[in-house]
Image (cartoon, rainbow, N blue to C red):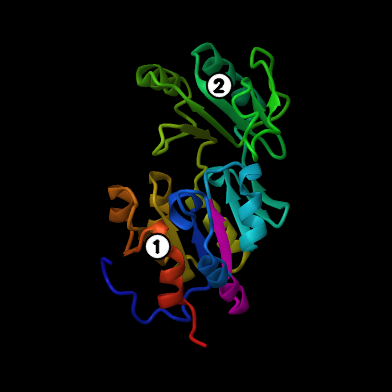
Amino acid sequence: MKKQAKGVKGSIRLVASDLDDTLVGKDKSISAYTREVFARCRAQGIVTVIATARLLASTQKEQEILQPDIRIVSGGGMTLRGDKALFFQGMGKAETSGLLLLLQEAGAQGILAGCRNRMYTNSTHFAASPTLHKALLHDFKEPVPEEACQIFFRLPDEGAAEEIKKGFSHLEWTKYRDGTYGVMAKGVSKAQALKKAARWCKIEMEQVAAFGDDEGDCEMLRQCGMGVAVENALPCVKEAASYITKSNEEDGVAWFVDKYILQSG
């Protein structure tokens, strides 16, 4: 740990955590200990939030198991309480269709556009996915009928990806640890979504603890009162954090919340 989190019990009113490689294991499992800690947070009146780059459809299992008060999905493009959207920020219909067409022409793989309630893809790649199989097949030569809050794709040729990025530099671009690109509307991030969620809950950012492992979590960790990186986080995330906890495989989030945030008894 970079420093000991002393004297903070009772001061944190909202706990937010990324999912993949942070709260869940490599096999996407959620431990009984993590479930227990989330339940104890709710019992003590601490708001629980999951903040992930995943699309909405890919968070249903975690919603059912953890029952978080708020879900931030699509890297901050949409925020929900239960199944009701509190905030949504898309990139516009014309922008969505223009980028999807360019990606298709460039031979990008695994293109997936997440909108409010639907997903669109030009590939059968997701047909076997238990969470993404409902994506609608769509030839992106034809405009998509709604705006996306996030577009995922892979493009092995980084030069080609950079060229496309130049034409859409006004959007937010992220490259994740597995090589997947994510594109969102300007100003969209987990950090901004978390700020809105905290404000909606009438909670100051100083009263927020956030956990993460990837580049997209850095701003969120810097801007809250208690930013915590898991041990397996990227170096830039550890640099952005005030504290470092155990790895995701060791229930690092649950362990930290139990030890430093939850009241005893």
Q: Residues within 10 Å of mark 2 (few under 14, many from 20)?
A: some
Identify the image quadrant of residue 97.
Answer: top right
Instruction: State whether residue 73 is above or below residue 203.
Output: above
Report if residue 46 is visible in the image: no
- Return the mark for residue 260: none
Residue type (three-letter) at the residue carrying disc 2: Leu
Place of residue 21 in the rendered image (x, y in percent of width and height, measured from the top left):
43, 50
Query: From which residue to which does the magenta span run?
Result: 39-51
Q: Residues within 10 Å of mark 1 (few under 14, many from 20)?
A: some
The earlier-in-sequence mark between 2 and 1 is: 2
- Return the mark for residue 99: 2
Q: Secondary structure at mark 2?
A: helix
- Return the mark for residue 250: 1
Q: Nearer the viewer, mark 2 or mark 1?
A: 1
**At 36% from the left edge and 21% from the top edge, which residue is drawn?**
158
Place of residue 84 in the rendered image (x, y in percent of width and height, measured from the top left):
73, 53
Residue type (three-letter) at the residue carrying disc 1: Glu
Identify the image quadrant of residue 259.
Answer: bottom left
- Is 40 a magenta residue? yes
Pick the front one: 145 or 124: 124
**At 53% from the left edge and 71% from the top edge, which residue is drawn?**
37
- Is 259 a magenta residue? no
The alpha-carbon separation of the residues under discs 2 and 1 comes to 40 Å
